[in-house]
Amino acid sequence: MQSFLDELADIVGASHVLTDPGVVAGYVTDWTGHWQGHTTAVVRPADTGQVSAVLALCSRAGVAVVPQGGNTGLVGGSIPMDGEVVLSTTRLSVIEHVDPIGRTIAAGAGVTIARARDAAREHGVEFGVDLASRESATLGGIVATNAGGIRVIKNGDTRSQLLGIEAVLSDGRVLTRWKELTKDNVGYGLPGLLAGSEGTLAVITRVLMRLVLPPSATRVAFVAVGSVGDALMVVDRLERAGLTLDAAELMTRSGIDLVCQHQQLRRPLSADAPFCVLVEVSGREDAETTLLEVLDDSHEFVLDAVVEEGPAHRLWQYRESHTESVGAASSTPPVKLDISTPLRDIEAFLNELTTGLDRRFPGVRAICFGHVADGNIHVNLLDAAPDQRDTLSDFVFHLVTDHNGSISAEHGVGRAKAPWMTLGRSAVDLDVMRSIRAALDPAGILNPHILPARRP
Ligand code: FAD
Ligand code: 2HG
Ligand code: ZN
């Protein structure tokens, strides 16, 4: 083992091969605290050449590798549970260009979303993906997970922002698809394939992504409603009135109460409604007037509402503090199940979820919230005993499959969902995924624990 570590040090420099338990602690535990692993070493290459040399060495030595960006993933995919080498991308942190006319950004995989956003804003353009983990999550991480976030309803998911990619295969070869073209149909869409591959096909080293125009006349409203169906009606009416919908986020009374308690905030509305939807709209100078008119005309759905100016203010706090607050309120790390269903199924899914939990899992609290216009609900189950985690996941995943949904809307499969991957994917589908994986990583050293197992 020592000579392997020496060879790593020859590639990246001894100070970038970390083995001290105190130093590697932050790399082997996930954000939720549930996944706690151990590693042979954390290696921090500075450029694509070093990533290539590290992977070629690991390949020859048969050592498994877990790529890691900001380590904000919520499904345990970035954690070495079996002593794998952690390949940290944080030093791949160069922003190469921001082109405000072509509306592209080219940058290293280790650049954080907040840095990419700030760089884009300096040129009067906007980065199209946004999520509450923006200060730590990296470009490589959002591409690897095909992250969603709060702007999918407007800009699409991360895959749809990706124009080009550079990635290193497990044997060290560098794959580059890098053209600033909207149209390019020569062969398979390899950047799109790597998006959402969760570190199982290659290590992403550089990305070329689209930028969008910044929204204008943004207004945020917090709207109390009696049901999910009513929340969707409000969203529908806003869009039909010609407003651009920048975000639509569902919360429940219990989730908001929990956030208010944890963040020491006052309740945002006086009505004691079971659901609230935060909507952000933009697009026209009269956005505020139109928004107020729509809310006023929708009195059959709207129980109470408050409107705020500007994109990033007080009202967003209630939504963005959910993850931290549920983590703090639960006696055990929350079971985090990020699911999606067709819009027409959300209400029935949530009702059956509540009934099923009450009947089968008394004592487990559910806090549900999420990107409602995408059909994406984050089911957080609090106070679950460790031996209940798998049965709870199994119950929710079967329920969501019965509603023609997905067991992973945006966080990925990781370790947390790997045992349930067969739900909603056919045998042929899984087989094709295994073949792709075997073609790109024949030695099977990249994140061997996640996505479909290499053999049935
Ligand atoms: P990591 O956590 O380090 O890794 C995630 C996965 O990607 C792992 O499987 C890892 O092996 C792989 N990976 C990372 N970098 C690379 C690379 N360069 N090459 C190949 N594989 C790589 N997610 C959403 O989708 N929407 C949200 O709204 C959202 N909000 C969040 C809010 C909070 C407060 C937190 C803590 C998390 C949130 N997440 C959200 C989850 C998480 O931030 C995203 O999954 C994000 O994309 C992970 O980026 P990362 O750099 O932290 O990746
Ligand atoms: C969000 O939308 C994230 O805030 C995290 O995807 C969801 O904490 C969660 O379950
Ligand atoms: Zn989310």
Image (cartoon, rainbow, N blue to C red):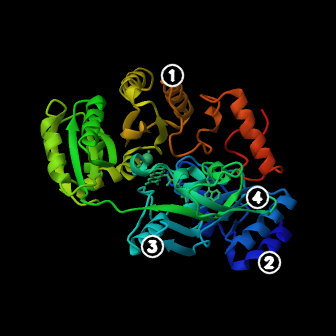
Which residue is denoted by mark 1 in the rendering?
402
The one of 109 and 66 positioned closer to us in this rendering? 109
- 416 displayed left or right of 351: right
User: Label 1 amino acid?
Assistant: Asp
Which residue is denoted by mark 3 in the rendering?
119
Is residue 321 visible in the rendered image? The answer is no
Dot 2 beta carbon under 8 Å from ligand 1: no
The one of 374 and 161 positioned closer to us in this rendering? 161
Is residue 41 visible in the rendered image? The answer is yes
Q: Name which of mark 1 and mark 3 comes first in the sequence.
A: 3
Dot 3 beta carbon under 8 Å from ligand 1: no
**Secondary structure type for disc 4:** loop
**Secondary structure type for disc 3:** helix
Residue at left offset 68%, top offset 79%: 15
Determine the CA span between mark 3 and mark 4. Answer: 29 Å
Residue 10 is marked as 2
Determine the CA span between mark 2 and mark 4. Answer: 20 Å
Residue at left offset 64%, top offset 34%: 419
Label 1 Cα neighbours within 10 Å, binned few <14 / some 14-19 / many ≥20: some
Determine the CA span between mark 3 and mark 2. Answer: 34 Å
The one of 245 and 99 positioned closer to us in this rendering? 99
Q: Name which of mark 2 and mark 4 comes first in the sequence.
A: 2
**Secondary structure type for disc 1:** helix
Q: Position of residue 450 (x, y in %)?
A: 67, 44
Q: Nearer the viewer, mark 3 or mark 2?
A: 3
Q: Name which of mark 3 and mark 2 comes first in the sequence.
A: 2
